[in-house]
Amino acid sequence: MTALPASPAEFRPNAPGRLIRLSFERTRIEIKTFFRAPDQVFFTFLLPVLFVVIFSTIFSGEIEGPPGAKKVEFSQYFVPGMIASGIVSATFASLAMTIAVEQHDGLLRRLSGTPLPRSAYFAGKVGLALFTAFVIVVLILAIGVVFYGVSLPTDPKKWGVFAAVFFLGVSACSLLGIAYTRLIRSSSSAAAIVQPPYLVLQFISGVFLQYSQVPPFLKVVAAIFPLKWMVQGLRYVFLPDWVAVDDYGGEWQVERVLLVLGIWLAVSFVLARVFFRWNRGYSG
Amino acid sequence: MTAAVSARGVRKRYGDFEALRGVDLEIEPGEVFALLGPNGAGKTTFVEILEGFRARSGGEATVLGVDPERGDLVWRSRLGIVLQSAGFFEQLTPDEVVSHFATFYPNPLDPRRVVDMVGLADKRSSRCKDLSGGQKRRVDLAMGIVGDPELVFLDEPTTGLDPQGRRQLWDVVREFARLGKTIVLTTHYLDEAEQLADRVGVIINGQLVEVGTPREIGGRERALARVTFALTGNLAGRPLPETGAETVSKNGRVTITTATPTAVVTALARWAEANGEPELPALAVSRPSLEDIYLAMVEAADGQADHKGSDA
């Protein structure tokens, strides 16, 4: 505490250094708080793990490729979808529900009474989501590799795409979850409002089935949202190229995947800024 | 020096209901100001407008020279807000929460010292979820003051505290007042207002009906005193002396309401002595308490409201 007192005029609340410092501080507190509620930790990580185990057990079989091509195990096929779904669960669904609770029990009002910048609050939420999503991805991969013969990519380029899809997907879906809280009118209704769009998108984006089985008009709907593109990008990482012919009409279109997710990141940042309210009681 | 808080004709309307009907108030820097009023009178609405949590429907307001509706983060850094029953950091300890809040401010106080100040030294490492209601109120206060604010809003700071806890919190408020901070508190406890506040404002039905020091509010200083004593011993059944004041004798107990209690007591003492009773039994001289004055104001205002209601 040797810093000289700054006069109010010198205090710049949105100075880059301060934003970075507060973003890390918020992330640290979010992660600490998260891990001190063991039931929350358990269920956050249990669901994606259960999905992998159930899917890999029920659909033990192979997908036939074109003549001469190597067959693909179902477990290998579903792992990328499970990862994408796990990311959405750790980001969009989890954040929308926890923020709704914080909004309605007054915790956000408390923060909004301080000079904490809104963007640092967002950053803390995204930081927590990055962390939990990362743990989920590691868990899914570990279980897949150890128990269900899932093979990891060897091409460094594929790992690069994996990292990019992860980062863009987590950030965009976290911010969408923050914006989505605007639709939640009470904390008790949060789950009922958050789950339906997420469940529907999982089906039409080909998380639970082969994307080629999704009816064309639903594919049009799915292509609007980020989940379909995350699944597509992650399938590129884990599957041979012939699968793209069946599922995505020829190619993986990795550049397009990254472009769409990048646009979603920008859009969701704007949506979060516009729709997020510190205080549900604020009457304008 | 500009006022710490300035409100002129502040109004708030919810549909057809007018929660605030034109409130004017100036609070000077360094002043401790208490807002009293029954539930639903508009106290909280008024304070939330000053805190920038609620938009007003009309009138002008500045807090530390800034319109609360345009208050930015620099302005926030100069304010401390102690909320009533807001969401809590259940999984963190008082030390962790207060240190976390300290990072938001440009020149915070030492978080550990603040935790000591509010009397949580022996609970500093317990999870907040394991604290009692009163201990949580102390954490609330610590969060509100750790930024070393110029102006502190305290919303019913001692609700749920035991008598010892209340005194400890009062000491913290006094300490802050001594450092020249401005304090605006709402309270239901009149003794709290009397103990802490330089001035008291009473809000009833969306209007500030009285502002003054706790001593003089509602004409308390000029209010008539009450002299009471018992008609026992040698005084039983004796005719009372003429004092020129309103005298009520009931169940052997006499109450005289007077502007000159000293003269009345002197006259009574002579009369008692003449009747062979050197001590007036159970003698008491009292002024109306702040509570009496306040309740009379609330009753008067309710009467007016009823009257207006019957006109409509």
Image (cartoon, grey):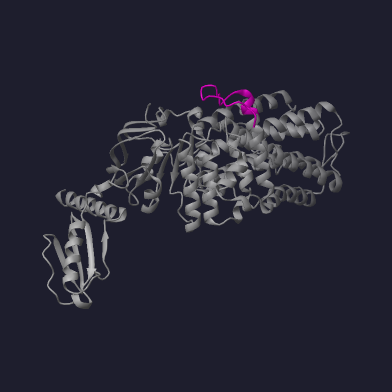
The part of the chain drawn in magenta is A1-20
Percent position of residue A200, x then y = 61, 43
Residue B24 horizontal side relative to residue A264, left or right: left
Percent position of residue B188, x then y = 38, 52
Quarter-of-image position of residue A267: top right
Q: Residue at x 27, y 59 (%)?
A: B286
Percent position of residue B32, x then y = 40, 41
Quarter-of-image position of residue A219: top right
Looking at the rendering, in which quadrant would you find the N terminus of chain B? Answer: top left
Residue B227 horizontal side relative to residue A179, left or right: left
Q: In the picture shown, does residue B61 fall above or below B310?
A: above
Residue A256 horizontal side relative to residue A102, left or right: right
Q: Residue at x 29, y 52 (%)?
A: B294
Percent position of residue B300, x then y = 21, 52
Whether A279 is among the magenta residues is no
Residue most extreme to the top: A10
Look at the magenta stretch and give its main secondary structure: loop
